Amino acid sequence: MESEQQLQEILWISTGPEQTEALGEALGRTLPAGAVLALDGDLGAGKTTLTRGLGRGLGGYEVSSPTFTLHDLHEGGRLSLSHFDAWMEGREKALLEDGGDEWLGGDGVAVIEWAERVLRWLPTPRVEVRLGHRGEEERQLAFQVVGPASDPLAQVLQAAILDALAAAGAPQQGAGQAHPEIS
């Protein structure tokens, strides 16, 4: 059994909600079926904002926070979007233990907000995204593909992230660089 690995972390700075949504939309146009995005960050860091853009890119879906519904399924676009919110302790684990994981890694894209609460149930490869405040509007997003580096889906996910960042107008990290910072 191949051990879980992480590909290079990719850092990106968003200047505001519009740019975060634009990145989400670009991701929605590039992510493959079976992609799982695990989003973490403080309240107001941009998890739902990124997902709102992702929904537009996948199929023009109107996305809002599923905190009180736990799971929203959007269908009819390029790919379906399963949007989970693991904020409320207990309910999210019950959903995933009772078969809700069928939406993870399926024919669409799955997004889990507050993913640190359910990491043990999430498949690999997956994209972990940490969102953090850098100011009133500015946010830092750290993308990490977790899973065997040799897995073809892991490689496709890494390429999709870089393509989406380029399409969203990733801020220059230095003269002549076309991609965001990779650490």
Image (cartoon, grey):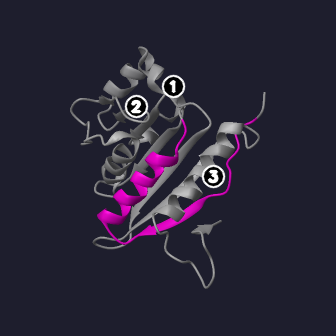
Q: Relative to residue 152, is residue 96 drawn left or right?
A: left
Task: Estimate the x, y position of residue 177 in percent, counting from the top left.
Answer: 62, 77
Give the position of the C terminus as an image quadrant: bottom right
Disc 3 and disc 1: Cα gap in Å?
20 Å
What residue range appears in magenta? 3-32
Query: Mark 2 or 3 closer to N-term?
Result: 2
Q: Which residue is mark 3?
A: 159
The residue type indicated by label 2 comes to Ser
Disc 2 and disc 1: Cα gap in Å?
9 Å
Q: Where on the picture, by quarter, is residue 67?
A: top left
User: Residue placed farthest to the top in the image?
Assistant: 98
Q: Which residue is mark 1?
A: 106
The residue type indicated by label 3 comes to Ala
Q: Relative to residue 57, is residue 146 drawn left or right?
A: right
The residue at the point 52 percent across, 47 percent down is 30
Q: Which residue is mark 2?
A: 80
The residue at the point 63 percent across, 82 percent down is 176
Q: Where on the picture, by quarter, is residue 80?
A: top left
Q: Does the magenta portion include 6?
A: yes
The residue at the point 50 percent across, 26 percent down is 107
Q: Does the magenta portion include 83?
A: no
Q: Residue 73 versus residue 89: which sits nearer the camera?
A: 73
